[in-house]
Amino acid sequence: MKTTRIILALFCLVAISLVSCTQKKTAPASAQDIVPKPVSILQKEGNPVILTKKTVILYDQNFKDQAKYLKDQLAQQCGWTSLSLVENTPQTTDRQPESAIVLLSGGSSHSDTDKAEAYKLYTVDENSVIIEAPTIRGFINGIQSLLQLFPVENADEVAIQPVEIYDYPRFAYRGMHLDVVRHMFSVDFVKKYIDYLAFHKFNTLHWHLTDDQGWRIEMLSYPKLNSIGSWRNSTLIGHFFDEPVRYDPNRYGGFYTRSEVKDILKYAEVRGIMVIPEIDIPGHSRATIAAYPEFSTKPDTTWNVAYTWGMYNRQNNVLAPRPETFEFLKTVFGEVADLFPAPYLHIGGDECSKKWWKEDPFCQQFIKANGLKDEADIQTYIVNEVVKYVQNKGKIIIGWDEILEGELDPAAVIMSWRGEKGGISAAKRKHKAVMTPSSVMYFNRYQTKSKRDSLQIPGYIPLEVVYAYEPVPEALKKEGLKDYILGAQACVWTEYIPTEKDVEYMIFPRMTALSEVLWVSSEKKDFDDFKRRLKLNIIPRYNLWNSDYCRDYEEWTTARVKEGEQGVID
Ligand code: ACM
């Protein structure tokens, strides 16, 4: 069936390319230059495939959006604005295109056919390039490789050397996080960030939507979360540790409307990106209790949405385990679960100060009445209630590694941020885990010691350290538990990252290095070769996208890291 379709799709292609010789261009990059490095590349004998502005994109049913995505990318990258999109049906044979890019749905003919995100990219004769994949993600991954074989400039024609690439990721979870609370970014920028993810063959955006400093998603059920919780009256200037502290008194905030969220989710879906929303509870809840003080341990207090950072254990009152709080959690998580198609919901669970529960007579009574040991058990109680609500919606929870403090539903996934310990103990307790150790995977730590990075939180993570990161700890390899590590993610906390350009500066080129960490097996990594491909093939893309990036990544090496500040695993 598949072979028939290939033959059908190609039958119509005339082998002779009738192209003008003006501005004739050959792609500057070959398959050996792709980032992340493909699993297998077979360079074939023969003449190149010549693609032109008259090339047709033939797509199989169900993948029209991805064909359109490819067309738009080629328009942006080399000015090919008029490529035609044609569904690959028997009638297509009438059209007789000179050359084609064919998106062909199907499993790979390689022996590993269970790889849902795999793709095969191969040339046929001198007139077509086939991307064959079983899923949207497979096509998106294959399209990225093809785009890297095109020049980043206007061209009349492009020559693709005969090749067969078979490729799939090492890890199932390849994520980037974005905190839109401490600073909020436009819908267009969130989309641009999703484009960055797609280009780098990541598959997950972890969208940090609520925290002490704001509530950034429209809620129907509790409107004060937006009218009050989405706005703060002041914002810290400079560093949290500065003396004296200074504030910008301008009101700051906003939230993404439901229709904006839906628009972003549609955009992500076309690009094969899963969006996991995070609603951070039971700590990091100042925006919630500013709107609804009755959910705090001090209902009679007027809380404001926080305007400073780093308040763990100090001013950030937490949710109290009252009946109305549980009703709130059930409703809010239900609303979010209904809006987002991802199978996961992130419930935070980090840095929840126990001091407020200790001081509160109601909470002490709650401990006794429910046979709990201590305040840590209140956290577990709340988390497990939310697990139930979320499970009733058919979803799995993800939480920061603090949620391991109690007995936890085995389906919960752990994000290991306080080093790798959380991930290791999660795996030993048979929980899946995602590695985000802050010493390597927090891209809000500085990457150079130049002025531009000086406001960031301490901890030096140059490019080299990111590239060297191995997400599966030795301890788990030894015990045969490596498969509990789903993958890794870099986090971008935006206390000191106020603008979109600053976000780009902090993620590039470290995100590009992480893409290779998550894609290829560790023995295939080669930092010098990575830097060669980065320079040749990726930095021109940063420029194409008009994105900022750290230009001094070669200058700031591990060797320049002061001892004790190196981004080593905790
Ligand atoms: C975290 O950085 N508090 C997860």
Image (cartoon, rainbow, N blue to C red):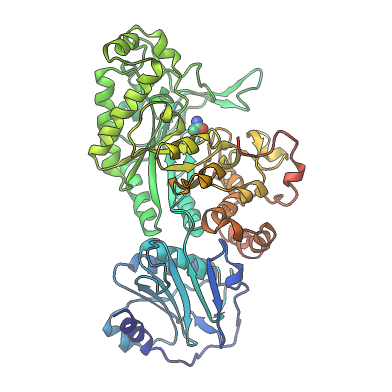
Question: Which one is in front, 375 or 443?
Answer: 375
Residue 539: give x, y in percent of width and height. 63, 59
Q: Which residue occupies 41% across, 36% down?
A: 429
Please tell me how many numbered marks the rendered image carries: 0
Give the percent coordinates (x, y) of residue 280. 40, 31
The quarter of the rendered structure image containing the C terminus is top right
Residue closest to the eye, 470 or 122: 470
As drawn, the residue found furthest toward the top would be 361
**Residue drawn 40% across and 86% down?**
97
Whether residue 420 is visible = yes
Q: Is residue 558 above or below residue 121?
A: above
Residue 109 rendering spot, x and y as whole percentages:
40, 74
In the rendered view, does 454 fall on the left or right side of 77? Answer: right
Does residue 467 lie above or below 75 as drawn?
above
Q: Is residue 341 left or right of residue 506?
A: left
Image quarter where the N terminus lies is bottom left
Quarter of the view holding residue 405: top left
Q: Report the residue at 37% width, 59% height from top.
A: 270
Residue 95, quarter of the rendered image: bottom left
Q: Nearer the viewer, residue 556 or 43?
A: 43
Q: Is residue 223 visible?
A: no
Reply above or below: 64 against 305.
below
Point 44% across, 40% down: residue? 427
Q: Position of residue 161 (x, y in %)?
A: 56, 80
Vertical side of 354 occupied by 430: above or below: below
Front residue of this view, candidates 339 and 53: 339
